[in-house]
Amino acid sequence: MVRIFAGAGALAALVGVALGAFGAHALSTRVEPRDLATFEIGVRYQMYHALGLLAVSWAATEWPGGLIHTAGWAFVVGILVFSGSLYLLVLTDTRWLGAVTPLGGVAFLVGWAALAWAVLRG
């Protein structure tokens, strides 16, 4: 699992940088400023949680167990649902996707809580 979460974190960061550049260069003149801000929020949270996945991969070497795995998978789901829904909302102008975004936020919260609990439990 260490390699899976480290690889997922590195891949999420790679995609986050690419999407950030896409937003800054290709979208900046094609979408409304509020939509560009929404896209940037998706990129920001993807990058935070890419780093979170790297922390999970390290924590898995120190405190292996189910809670660490829960944290990692919750971060993956959060990136896909939270950031993914924001990207799709902006790129497709499908506004109802904004209702899905908080589910990804809940996944992020679950991930951080599971990581904290695993580390504190030792």
Image: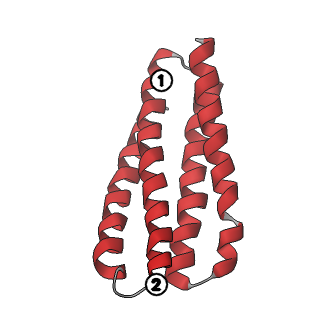
Of the pair 8 and 28, the residue shown nearer to us: 28
| Residue 65 rendering spot, x and y as whole percentages | 60, 21
Of the pair 29 and 101, the residue shown nearer to us: 29
Total marks drawn?
A: 2
Q: What's the amino acid at mark 2?
A: Glu
Is 34 situated above or below 1?
below
Observer able to see residue 2: no
Q: Residue at x 55, y 48 (%)?
A: 76
Q: Residue at x 68, y 48 (%)?
A: 106
Relative horizontal placement of residue 95, taking residue 48 as reference (left or right): right
Dot 2 alpha-carbon crowd within 10 angstroms: few under 14, some 14 to 19, many 20 or more: few
Which dot marks residue 32? 2
Alpha carbon of mark 2 to alpha carbon of mark 1: how far? 41 Å
What colour scheme has been applied to the protein in the rendered image?
secondary structure
Dot 1 alpha-carbon crowd within 10 angstroms: few under 14, some 14 to 19, many 20 or more: some
Of the pair 71 and 95, the residue shown nearer to us: 95
> Does label 2 or label 1 sit earlier along the sequence?
2
Observer able to see residue 55: yes
**Which residue is most to the top?**
122
Q: Residue at x 70, y 56 (%)?
A: 103
**Which residue is most to the bottom?**
30
Is 103 situated above or below 4?
below
| Residue 54 rendering spot, x and y as whole percentages | 41, 36
Q: What's the amino acid at mark 1?
A: Ala
Residue behind mark 1 = 59
| Residue 52 rendering spot, x and y as whole percentages | 47, 38
Q: Secondary structure at mark 2?
A: loop
Is 105 situated above or below 63?
below
